[in-house]
Amino acid sequence: MRFFKLKHSGSYLPPLTWLIMARLILAAFLINISSPAFSVGGDENRFTLNARPSFETVPTDKKALYETAQAQGYCSEVLKIEQEGLVQSRPEFKDRFATDVIRDKVDQTALEIYALGYRRCQALRHLSRVLAVPKLKAGIAPYAPLLSSTPKKITNEDTRFTHFTPKPRLGIFFKKNSVALNKLIDDRSRPKGLDRPIDWARSQMPLDEEILLHTAFTDLVILAICHSHKEAYKDLGKFYDVQFSVIDPFVNYGLFRQALYLDIDTRQMKQRLRNVGLALPPSVIQDLDQQSSLNQLYKHPRLARLFKLCRSY
């Protein structure tokens, strides 16, 4: 793929970002050409993105390892386990998706789109990478491995790193001249923007790292909203608790209301929803609650952008 020069940036995107972009562009292309179902084979060999989620096909004897691998960032191990689950649940794919099969780029991309746990693992790894410097600036160790069975208590100090990182955005940032990318480039020139860190004029995050930040956060939101991935909802809730979330309260309302609908971390999600409500007029909350009770949040004009992400990848 040819490098392109981003306007106002004066630099080229490095190989890591291009690898991520190339995968997402290919994924978007595959989904677009396979509407309404995501096809990885002929008419007799199909699975869809809205079919049984990959985390439900994980072999029983691998579930503990699967969860631990995600929690500790062993993404290749996560992919392998989901791959085994796919082959067990759909034997017709054995010749193309077994662990010992050499796949072409199309099949590999298909597998990586299907493997929702792998996508979550990758998103969290990418966020860990781009948030490392803000955590250093805040005096918080960027790498603190914890056992998945030992939940870390959130303290006030954990929120300080958000003073040194851009607020996450939602959108498609890996396409040249996309609306989201162009707006991001323009907004980066405004140090006093609402989503800019307090030291932005002094120490900007490189463009490729910020693209990675927004792309990874967007994929977590897609996993939650579009695939009902419980762990992704929990991730977004924990990020919200340390003040790392999108500025738009409507988006946060939609995320936490959907989590409640799925009965995910009910007590915590209700508290987050109350906190979001403080940023919105009571009449607006009443209207949102009514649409939520009718399961029609996707029709709200301020939430349409959130749910339209499901069409992207």
Image (cartoon, helix red, strand yellow):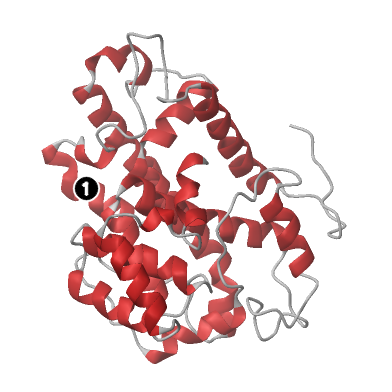
Q: Is residue 194 left or right of residue 281?
A: right
51 lies above or below 252: above
Q: Quickly name the residue at label 1.
A: 65
Q: Is residue 181 left or right of residue 72?
A: right
Please tell me which residue lies in front, 148 or 18. 18
287 lies above or below 59: below
Percent across and percent down for residue 44 are: 32, 8
Percent across and percent down for residue 37 are: 40, 24
Q: Residues within 10 Å of mark 1 (few under 14, many from 20)?
A: few
Residue at 51% over, 19% down: 104
Residue at 26% over, 55% down: 230
Q: Is residue 137 left or right of residue 246?
A: right
Q: Is residue 234 visible?
A: no
Q: Amino acid at mark 1?
A: Leu
Q: Quadrant of residue 49?
A: top left
Percent across and percent down for residue 21 are: 62, 42
Residue at 49% over, 48% down: 309
